[in-house]
Amino acid sequence: MAKTKRRDKSRVVLRTGESQRADGTYHYCWTDANRKRRYVYAKTLDELRYKEEQIEKDKKSILVKYKSLPWLLAP
């Protein structure tokens, strides 16, 4: 059986980590480098996806900055 895609109340497909809360707002959760779960909240899905893009940019800039120091990124 095919895996069903998660959707919000307006039937938009949600990406990994995205969820819609009972009050209609959205949140995105991810795990940071210290293995701590982080959350970001937004009123609309567009706002949330913009915040997700900023988070991904920040994660990539940290990897580039500390690439010469791999012991900082070790689990």
Image: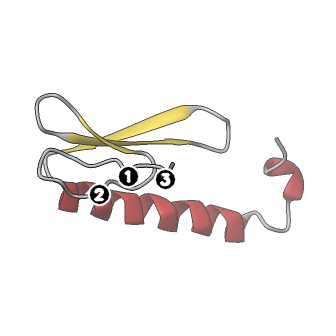
Residue 35, above or below 50: above
Task: Indicate the position of residue 53 as horizontal and vertical percent values.
Answer: 40, 66
Q: Secondary structure at mark 1?
A: loop
Q: Earlier in the sequence, mark 3 or mark 2?
A: 3
Kind of residue sitting beneath label 3: Ala
Residue 14 placement, left or right of 61: left
Image depth: mark 1 or mark 3 in front:
3
Residue 49, above or below 31: below
Residue named by callout 2 = 13
Q: Nearer the viewer, residue 2 or 56?
A: 2
Q: Quadrant of the C terminus?
A: top right
- What whole-number distance in Å separates the C-alpha atoms at marks 3 and 2? 15 Å
Residue located 40% across and 37% down the image: 39
Contact check, label 1 and label 2, Cβ < 8 Å = yes
Residue 55 placement, left or right of 36: left
Task: Indicate the position of residue 44 as horizontal and vertical percent values.
Answer: 14, 52
Q: Residues within 10 Å of mark 1 (few under 14, many from 20)?
A: few
Q: Secondary structure at mark 2?
A: loop
Image depth: mark 1 or mark 2 in front:
1
Residue located 29% across and 57% down the image: 13
Residue 27, above or below 69: above
Kind of residue sitting beneath label 2: Val
Residue named by callout 1 = 5
Kind of residue sitting beneath label 1: Lys
Task: Indicate the position of residue 6 as horizontal and vertical percent values.
Answer: 34, 47
Task: Indicate the position of residue 61 as horizontal and vertical percent values.
Answer: 59, 68
User: On residue 26, which mark appears?
Assistant: none
Q: Secondary structure at mark 3?
A: loop
- What whole-number distance in Å separates the C-alpha atoms at marks 1 and 3? 9 Å
Q: Earlier in the sequence, mark 1 or mark 2?
A: 1
User: On residue 2, which mark appears?
Assistant: 3
